[in-house]
Amino acid sequence: MSAGFDRIAVAALLVASGVAGLLFTPVFGWEPLLVPVLVVVLVGYGCVELTAKFPKLTPFRPLLVALAGLLGLVETVLTSTTLAFLPTGASLQGVARGLTEGWRLTLQSTWPARPVPDQLLFVPLTVLLAVVLGLELVLRLKKPLVALVPSLVVAGLAQAYQALTGIGAVAAALAYALPAGLLLWTGRRTRSVSRTPGGPRFSWRVTGSAVWPALSTVVALVAGAVALAVLDPVGRDPLTLKDTQAAPPPRSRLANPLDEIAQRLTQPDEEVFRYRSDTPVDQWRLIVLNGFDGSNWLADSRLRRLGAGLDGAPDGASGTAELRVRGLAGPWLPSHPGLTGVDGLTPLVDETAGTLLMDSPSAGPVRDYRLTWSSPDVDLGTGEVDARAPGGLSGLGAVPPEIEQVAKDAVRGLRPTFQSALQLERFLSTNYQVAVGKEDLPTGHGWPQLRHFLLESKRGTSEQFAAAYVALARMSGIPARLVVGFRGSAETDGGMNVVHNRDVLAWPEVAVAGAGWVALDPTARAGKAKQDQAGPGKAVARARAQLPAEQELRPPQLPPGTPPDAAEDQSADVGASWWWLALAAFVVLFGLLWLFGVPMAKVVRARRRRRRSGAEGVLGAWDEIRDRLRAHGVPFRIGMTPRDLAESAGSLAGEGIREPVARLAKVLDVTLWSGVPVGDGAVRRAWQEVGEVRKGLAARPFAARVLAALEPRTLVPIKSRDGS
């Protein structure tokens, strides 16, 4: 070990800081983070070795670590901005963007985020800052516990971005706790002089009080990770920083595609886009609208920058399509509800709706990109609707009174189920007519236009059909939303399917428990399409075929025993989760007992000892001093005399502790061996020395006093009390 610094302490601090940076793995993945974080750690250690070899550089160590770390990050993350491996102005701008904008851009992205420099750099830069501060705290101020604070801040920031759970949380806690405990261990070792000829002058000896902080740190962090991983009293995901940030909308004008349906139908042969897909596509969506104020339908979109990909449907059928868009002026792009990735563009995405928008105006009239998705194998199950689906039962504005009767007639008194949703679809497709041709096409989707459509003309485009369906469904308790897009096309040209303006379509989607949002088509065009249907479309077609005739429909009742079954399910859920809550409660109780119970027990014990009289009072003072010194790391063994303890304690805090313990030794000798009755004066003198020792220990560092207060082993009595 060099004379300049403790290599074990420095290495432990750097490893803890590196582990804290790698806790951002759920955000970027571990591969993009490993190299830049490792560079920061190695640079920090190299700079410490350099300043140890050249002590004159020690005052400049923080600057050396910062500059060398920035250079290392430029060479590894911003390589494309360098010229002959030398930083350029673009490199400095990239570092500035990573420092000032990276954290926000990452929060606005889906995760895993794209490991582009503008987003990725803020993580190793944060680790670099923690390394600079931590090294100075451990090398200059000799405060290992305080030196861990910067890395703990980085770890806390990572958990605020995306909290680890389960086994991952426990593994991460262990990975951080081991180097952190090692660092605390280096701060609690005792150095002894070696008297062996030819041996090293100094050697390090581990004391019980040195091992205890390391062990307690590991136990506390692992227990905390387990508690955070399983404690979920309200059954919801924890709030993260990501929930507070959303990507700003595109700078181009956001026209509502619902307003363009009639206009497109007047130019039916104009091409909009073409695609080549390896699986059938029923609809291509542009926008999902779930807000309605009585006049306008609005998209309650929470946009994010599309990262490396999205999670598709579990065990879903994957699909891929290449698209070439040329007839869409707005930012909306054809997309798929089970979207998992986009290549060729860097769009914004609404994850809950599966819609895509261009982040900036297109550079040309044609946009080529590649979509991947995962379509679930829809199982409509019992056909129960999901009333908790976001936006499914949003407002309807001021509903005209006569529309309420239409809603009742449409579902024939059925309670809200997927069967009643299909009945509503059949009601509209049977009793209303789809407007065709290029002229005199109905427009509008507010209540005035919907009232005219439902009660008077009974003729409309998919705009009125879909809007009326969603409004009537919500009035009947069926969660629904409105989607605008295009039908999949069977017309091909050059090996690609061609979608024209005549394929424009608005359709409703109904939320079904266990199946998600299921698309319907009240215009009755879906069953007439001359193309294969995808998995969800086939499931809906089967449900339509099984729908009884209107005169045979009966208001279905809940199956007998449903309430008890529901109660049993609830009891099962409670039984499955109670032991998690019990474990979390035990961890919390254990922490509270440790933080408050141990110091309080020591206070109570000291008061009881102080109340003793005679020889017991003097022995109580000796026990109090001995236990206080043990808590501060002074070694004590059975057989040590008070004078031996005084010498050991003197190395801890000097004469301020050695002299009071030595004076107490004299009082203790008189008490034990003189045979003279012990009066109150001797007890007072003994406890005055306790007060002097307390004053001497109060001069120790704050962290050492906290650890001593939380040291529980001194609460266990030592069997021998004869003072030897």
Image: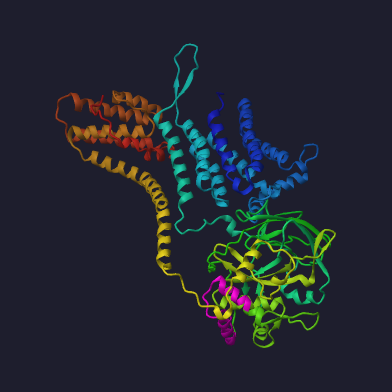
Residue 273 horizontal side relative to residue 677, left or right = right
Residue 127 pos. (x, y %):
61, 42
82 and 393: which is toward the camera: 393
State the image quarter where residue 638 is shown: top left
In the rendered structure, which segment of residues is drawn in magenta?
A: 400-426
- Reply above or below: 588 against 67: below
Residue 362 horizontal side relative to residue 61, left or right = right
Camera sees residue 143: no
- Of helix, strand and loop, which mostly describes the magenta segment? helix
662 and 213: which is toward the camera: 213
State the image quarter where residue 131 is shown: top right
534 and 339: which is toward the camera: 534
Q: Residue furthest top?
A: 197
Residue 66 pos. (x, y %):
65, 39
Q: Quadrant of the N terminus?
A: top right
Q: State the residue at coordinates (57%, 36%).
A: 15
- Reply above or below: 261 against 41: below
Q: Residue furthest right?
A: 494
Q: Quadrant of the C terminus?
A: top left
- Is residue 522 in the magenta section? no
574 and 235: which is toward the camera: 574
Q: State the residue at coordinates (24%, 34%).
A: 620
Residue 470 pos. (x, y %):
62, 75
Q: State the residue at coordinates (32%, 25%).
A: 637
Residue 683 pos. (x, y %):
21, 35
Camera sees residue 218: yes
- Reply above or below: 233 against 692: below
> What colour scheme was applied to this rendering of the protein?
rainbow
- Is residue 403 in the magenta section? yes
